[in-house]
Image (tube, rainbow, N blue to C red):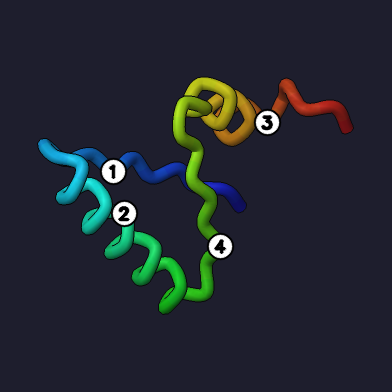
Amino acid sequence: MTGLVAVSAPTIEELDAAVAAVEQAAIQASCETRRLVGQQAAAFTAAALPLTRPV
């Protein structure tokens, strides 16, 4: 299963803190995370449109 989480903040420092909080929560939930900086469109296509993946 794949899920996408978007994290935003008004400053870089707050963004770093918010990302760290999400990553920590994911670890506690036994989930793997990957940062997709600048790859949101490709990640959305891969996660939300599974019919486009070759079988």
The amino acid on which the numbered mark 2 sits, given as a three-letter code, is Val
Q: Secondary structure at mark 2?
A: helix
For the residue carrying disc 2, how many other residues have a C-alpha within 10 Å: few (<14), some (14-19), or many (20+)?
some
Q: Separation of disc 1 and disc 3 at Cα? A: 23 Å
The residue that label 3 is drawn on is 50
Q: Nearer the viewer, residue 44 or 17?
A: 17
Q: Secondary structure at mark 1?
A: loop
Image x and y of residue 15, in percent: 22, 46
The amino acid on which the numbered mark 4 sits, given as a three-letter code, is Glu
Residue displayed at 56% across by 31% down: 43
Q: Separation of disc 3 and disc 4 at Cα? A: 19 Å
* Residues under numbered marks 1 and 4 in contact, where contact means CB atoms less than 8 Å apart: no
The residue that label 4 is drawn on is 32
Left or right: where 53 falls relative to 3? right
The amino acid on which the numbered mark 1 sits, given as a three-letter code, is Val
State the mark number for residue 7. 1
Residue displayed at 28% across by 43% down: 7
State the mark number for residue 34. none
The residue that label 2 is drawn on is 19
Front: mark 1 or 3: 1
Q: Quadrant of the C terminus?
A: top right
Q: Separation of disc 1 and disc 2 at Cα? A: 7 Å
Earlier sequence position, callout 4 versus callout 2:
2
* Residues under numbered marks 1 and 2 in contact, where contact means CB atoms less than 8 Å apart: yes
Earlier sequence position, callout 3 versus callout 4:
4
